[in-house]
Image (cartoon, helix red, strand yellow):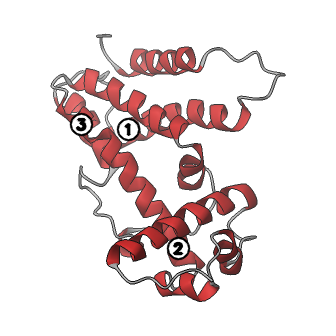
Amino acid sequence: MPPKLKTEAERQQLRTLIIDAARDLFVTRGVEAVTMREIAKRIDYSATSIYLHFADKESLLRAICDTDFLALATALKTILDIPEPVERLIALGNGYAQFALSHPNHYRLMFMTPHAPTGPEQSTLLQNNPEQDAYFQLKTVVNEIFRIGKFKTELTDPDLIAQTIWAGIHGVCSLQIIMAQDTWVEWRDIEARLLAMQQVMLLGLLKELP
């Protein structure tokens, strides 16, 4: 029988334990296949203990995503202090990839696992806030580069530019996470693939390479 929680620190510790166990189960077995009872069994608590923290599986999934999206934004936040915007954009791509490859289960659930559509009303995070929103961090840098006229003149939609950059780095990271062990592909070093993707995108986006 697990001990009865008495302090706020103990309750937060249990909440983190639930989130970590659920993340692992959701990634390995799929969100739909996992029950709250199975999550409780994984951490040796009762299902009732889980429901004291999360009303249902959907709210637990949202909490995991909020936790991980905040961790991503926090990991990238100091990069925003780089003064030159193109250098900042390159550093953001590298930081994003580092987070993805260092936390593959987090990344799988955030960006590679189907789940219900989410918006501001389903999240505890503040959108358009550089402290909590990594996509806003990317858009901020892209908008600055756009404002100073460094993108090619035919590129007129900063949001499209940001989403294309995101898709490029995501593609390299997701292939590494899913298929790095497959031997039918003669994979080049992951750092080389990330660098090549960055170079190809910058060549296509910028008037002049830095």
Image coordinates of residue 51 in percent, x first then y, are: 54, 86
Looking at the picture, tell me which residue is in the foreground, 159 or 40: 40
Q: Given this view, does label 1 or label 2 mark the residue nearer the observer?
A: 2
Above or below for 77 versus 42:
above
> What's the amino acid at mark 2?
Leu
Q: Would you say 45 lies left or right of 208 here?
A: right
Q: So how many labels did they put on this image?
A: 3
Determine whether the residue tagged by mark 3 lies in a helix, strand or loop.
helix
* Label placed on residue 78: 3
Residue 72 appears in view: yes
> Which image quarter is the N terminus in?
bottom right
Please tell me which residue is depicted at 24% across the width and 21% down the height of the picture.
Answer: 150
Mark-to-mark CA distance, 1 and 2:
29 Å
Image coordinates of residue 131 in percent, x first then y, are: 24, 52
- Name which of mark 1 and mark 2 comes first in the sequence: 2
> What's the amino acid at mark 1?
Ala
Above or below for 154 versus 18:
above
> Which image quarter is the C terminus in?
top left
Looking at the picture, tell me which residue is in the foreground, 154 or 189: 189
The image quarter in which residue 129 lies:
bottom left
The residue to which callout 1 is attached is 162
Image coordinates of residue 83 in percent, x first then y, are: 15, 25
> What's the amino acid at mark 3?
Thr
Image coordinates of residue 163 in percent, x first then y, are: 43, 41
* Label placed on residue 60: 2
Residue 118 appears in view: no
